[in-house]
Amino acid sequence: MIRSLFFFRLLFFATPFLFVQPEAHAQNNAGSQPPNIIFIIGDDISGDDLGAYGNGLVKTPNLDRMAADGALFRNFFVTTSSCSPSRTSILTGRYPHNTGAAELHTPLPASLTYFPEQLRKAGYYTALLGKWHEGPNTKRAYDRITGGAARNGSGGEALWADMISKCKATGKPFFLWLAPFDAHRTWSPDREFAVTHDPKDIRVPPTLVDDSSTRRDLASYYNEIGRIDTHLGKLRATLEQEGLAQNTIIIFTADNGRPFPGSKTRLLDRGLKEPFIIYWPGVIEPGTVNHALVSSIDIAPTLLEIAGVRPAPSVQGISFLPLLKKPAKTFRNYLFGEHNWHDYEAYERSVRTKDFLYIFNGRPRLDNGGPIDANQSPSARSLKQQRDQLTPLQSDALAAPRAPEEFFVMGQDPLQTLNQIQNPKYRREINALRKKLKQWQRETGDTEPVQLTPDWYHRITGKALPQKNTRGEMPGAAADAPHNNNKGPF
């Protein structure tokens, strides 16, 4: 039975294909098959670090062209600035504490449904190439997996073109989850890249010290983004050669902020705000710019709706398909974020609107300089060496204790430098967001564990501590959050 909802979307978008029964394979005599979907997720890339987002120094001509040919989202946020929890959130369409895998390197339970799994059951050929650290149960979502959790240099990019040919040979629509390791530390040798950036040309963000060490660090980071961009160009050329370009959706995003102090693991925009570019020829008008608030939990229901598949009841996200045709529409009122253990003990929660950001910190005595790869980086060493000469924004990553609550006003403070939590002018807005965050926690079953997972590494030296590999209680476990399907405030 073809659902009336999907017919509505078909008429609404006037797309060149017909939706088919989710249970059937995509070959369909009544029309051409559903679109192929290629989902590219970079590793540790902040939202502003692409040319299309205003960074004129990073060399991303292919991503910039993809944005010009499709839609660029300016307010897309992940649910956590932490690698595997962010990806598990995308895979399930659920908040991290609702997955049972809220902390780094914790596997997703078998009881949940993963959206590529639903696509596979609906007749899609599904494959993952590159980084795969969401747990062994997710293997059932893919016909093929080529990759693993540990970086081996390539992230599978060299196999992208060959995979397109293999997918075409199946005669099915296909879904590819392409997960390069770029731009995760440690950096691959710069000489391997097709794109190079000169440290002298780098503009250092205000969160970091402007010295030669930091400039070299950022140049290598940009080189890794450039390598993804080069492979994207080759991928699009392959789709053209294979005659698949006109019926293939391409999405580019990333899992969390750049791996530098003050970004990765933070609930500020520089931790949660990510690039999101979608190319869909014949449907999305070229050059579309979308300003609506969108969460990464909304990806799963959107792609399932495009494929004509009803999202599993466990999906907490909402489809943003209408935004692809009418980008001026409003969507979410609230975005929620969380920071759980990632090398270090943590419990932070956030709620963001277009105008304000409120953050609750359950461990104010501790700093948040990022995970070990960020706080032991050359850029972090520069911060520590010049600790007495830092600006407030630079010293933020080293600060301890920290405020238990933070409130930022977007319009006058886009970098989120001035905590207005004590400003009586915003008492009403602060109280409203404080209540909204508690409502979200209550409705989705988010609980703060009595015993959190402790630090595995020394926060200054980075050396392993005796309690390494010790796990505490998972956030939300006390309220059985993995079985709570409540979507929370929208």
Image (cartoon, rainbow, N blue to C red):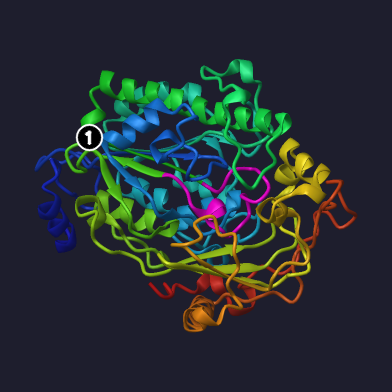
Magenta stretch, main secondary structure, is loop
Residue 230 vertical position relative to residue 460 in the rendered view, above or below? above
State the image coordinates of residue 76 (x, y, percent, origin top left). Answer: 41, 53
Q: Nearer the viewer, residue 87 or 311?
A: 87
Quadrant position of the C terminus in the picture? bottom left
Task: Identify the image quadrant of residue 424.
Answer: bottom right
* Magenta region: 255-275
**Residue at label 1?**
247
Q: Residue at x 71, y 50 (%)?
A: 371
Q: Residue at x 29, y 60 (%)?
A: 310
State the image coordinates of residue 290 (x, y, percent, origin top left). Answer: 30, 51
Q: Amino acid at mark 1?
A: Asn
Residue 65 vertical position relative to residue 326 in the rendered view, above or below? above
State the image coordinates of residue 259 (x, y, percent, origin top left). Answer: 64, 43
Is residue 154 at all visible to an observer of this figure?
A: no
Residue 200 vertical position relative to residue 395 in the rendered view, above or below? above
Is residue 317 at all visible to an observer of this figure?
A: yes
Q: Nearer the viewer, residue 382 or 23?
A: 382
User: Quick check: is 385 in the magenta stretch?
Assistant: no
Q: Residue at x 41, y 21 (%)?
A: 162
Instruction: Label 1: state its secondary structure.
Output: helix
State the image coordinates of residue 43 (x, y, percent, origin top left). Answer: 55, 40
